[in-house]
């Protein structure tokens, strides 16, 4: 008799969710498992949740599509009264033998507890555009988000900022880690403000004015949504929780825009790509490894190696698939922040160490050719 695998996606969106699902579903079918899909993350196993049969559903097209066809939510069974008991009851109801949970720290944190405290057979696959889960080289979804963000920065900087002689502030997602914000360097960002450390406003203003003049009267600043400053940036509400009571901070770029305009007297505009970074087709590298990680999760089930999280690691300049026990991922209950030696906090730019880290994700960094702008400006002045 076939064993049943339930797969679902939880938490925020990431462009690699559907490719990961493709890897899981395709591999499960080839290995003789019956595959079920849970709708809306952990909510699928709570009372009133929905589980569907994926046996006869064609999936060939989903590997190149963004979003998740199983939908998602931030539901955590440990935050719901009787949630764990409901999970156990519905596992029996649907005759589920194994669970593959795809998600970030909240979704996989629940998976860790359910496996180690309740002995529920689970494999976790990471995903988050924030790239803040420990023990994996990157999280699926981050490569695509970094690609989209760096391109967004490049277009705003090269077209709008230059043409209008403005300072543009682009606000990045990423919560309390600066991995995604720092990818703006690939789009030529002049200043980047990650959230890991408090930034001195006076130094920020000095660098902004300097780089604005050096460029020929235009500049672009990337600011992380949870950036911190040594003095209050007026008008910013720090407590903006979502519907699941998860604390979020948004639109810090707006009061920062006001501050820079008032202090430097330069026309400044803020733009917020927001959920655009979580959407869209996965990049080739993201798709490739997301599919492989989905396949690896089924392989662990086949080998009865449960309570693991699939991870990526770099060995001899190659990215390989491996796994680690869920309990070790969450042993310190800490997010993976941007590493100290990856960022120059005085000059507000990533270091070569960060660029080396990003090479397998976005390729070799190519510095922006400011000479082009300077030559154009010289022609205009001399015409």
Image (cartoon, grey):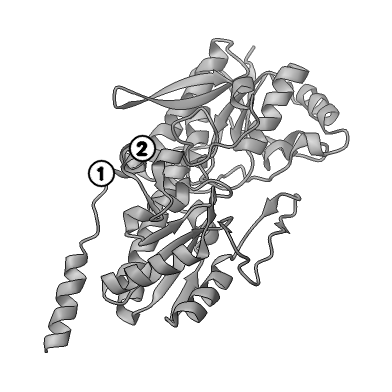
- Which image quarter holds the N terminus? top right
Residue 281 visible at all? no
Residue 175 percent across, percent down from the top left = 58, 50
Q: Which badge, 1 or 2, comes first in the chain's sequence?
A: 2
Residue 116 percent across, percent down from the top left = 71, 18
Residue 199 percent across, percent down from the top left = 52, 57
Q: Nearer the viewer, residue 164 or 300?
A: 164
Q: Are marks 1 and 2 in contact (CB under 8 Å)?
A: no
Q: Nearer the viewer, residue 173 or 102?
A: 173
Question: What residue is at 22 percent from the left and 65 percent from the top?
Answer: 370
143 left or right of 105 in image: left
- Which image quarter holds the C terminus? bottom left
Question: What residue is at 64 percent from the left and 24 percent from the top?
Answer: 331
The answer to whether residue 184 is above or below residue 260 is: above
Residue found farthest to the bottom: 383
Question: What residue is at 29 percent from the left and 22 percent from the top?
Answer: 316
* Disc marking residue 185: none
Location of residue 63 by image quarter: top left
Q: Which residue is mark 1?
A: 364
Question: What residue is at 80 percent from the left and 39 percent from the top?
Answer: 79
77 left or right of 351 in image: right
* Disc marking residue 357: 2
């Amino acid at each position: 008799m076939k064993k049943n695998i339930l797969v679902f996606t939880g938490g925020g969106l990431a462009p690699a969710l559907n490719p990961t699902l493709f890897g899981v579903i395709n591999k499960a079918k080839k290995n003789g498992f019956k595959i079920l899909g849970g709708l809306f993350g952990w909510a699928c196993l709570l009372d009133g949740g929905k589980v569907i049969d994926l046996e006869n559903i064609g999936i060939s097209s989903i590997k190149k599509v963004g979003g998740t066809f199983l939908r998602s939510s931030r539901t955590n069974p440990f935050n719901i009264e009787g949630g764990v008991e409901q999970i156990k009851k519905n596992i029996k109801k649907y005759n589920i033998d194994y669970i593959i949970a795809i998600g970030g720290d909240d979704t996989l944190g629940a998976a860790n507890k359910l496996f180690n405290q309740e002995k529920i057979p689970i494999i976790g696959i990471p995903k988050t555009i924030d790239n803040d889960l420990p023990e994996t080289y990157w999280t699926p979804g981050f490569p695509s988000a970094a690609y989209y963000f760096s391109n967004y920065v490049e277009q705003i900087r090269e077209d709008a900022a230059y043409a209008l002689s403005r300072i543009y502030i682009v606000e990045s997602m990423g919560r309390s880690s600066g991995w995604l914000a720092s990818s703006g360097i690939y789009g030529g960002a002049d200043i980047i403000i990650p959230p890991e450390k408090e930034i001195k406003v006076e130094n920020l203003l000095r660098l902004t004015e300097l780089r604005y003049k050096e460029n020929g009267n235009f500049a672009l600043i990337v600011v992380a949504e949870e950036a911190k400053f040594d003095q209050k940036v007026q008008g910013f509400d720090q407590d903006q929780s979502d519907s699941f009571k998860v604390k979020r901070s948004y639109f810090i770029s707006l009061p920062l825009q006001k501050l820079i305009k008032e202090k430097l007297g330069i026309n400044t505009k803020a733009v917020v790509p927001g959920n655009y970074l979580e959407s869209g087709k996965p990049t080739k590298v993201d798709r490739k490894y997301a599919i492989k990680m989905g396949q690896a999760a089924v392989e662990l089930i086949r080998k009865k190696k449960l309570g693991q999280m699939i991870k990526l690691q770099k060995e001899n300049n190659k990215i390989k698939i491996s796994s680690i026990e869920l309990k070790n991922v969450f042993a310190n209950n800490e997010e993976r922040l941007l590493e100290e030696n990856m960022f120059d906090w005085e000059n507000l730019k990533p270091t070569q160490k960060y660029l080396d880290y990003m090479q397998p994700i976005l390729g070799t960094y190519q510095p922006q050719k400011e000479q082009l702008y300077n030559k154009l400006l010289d022609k205009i002045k001399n015409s």
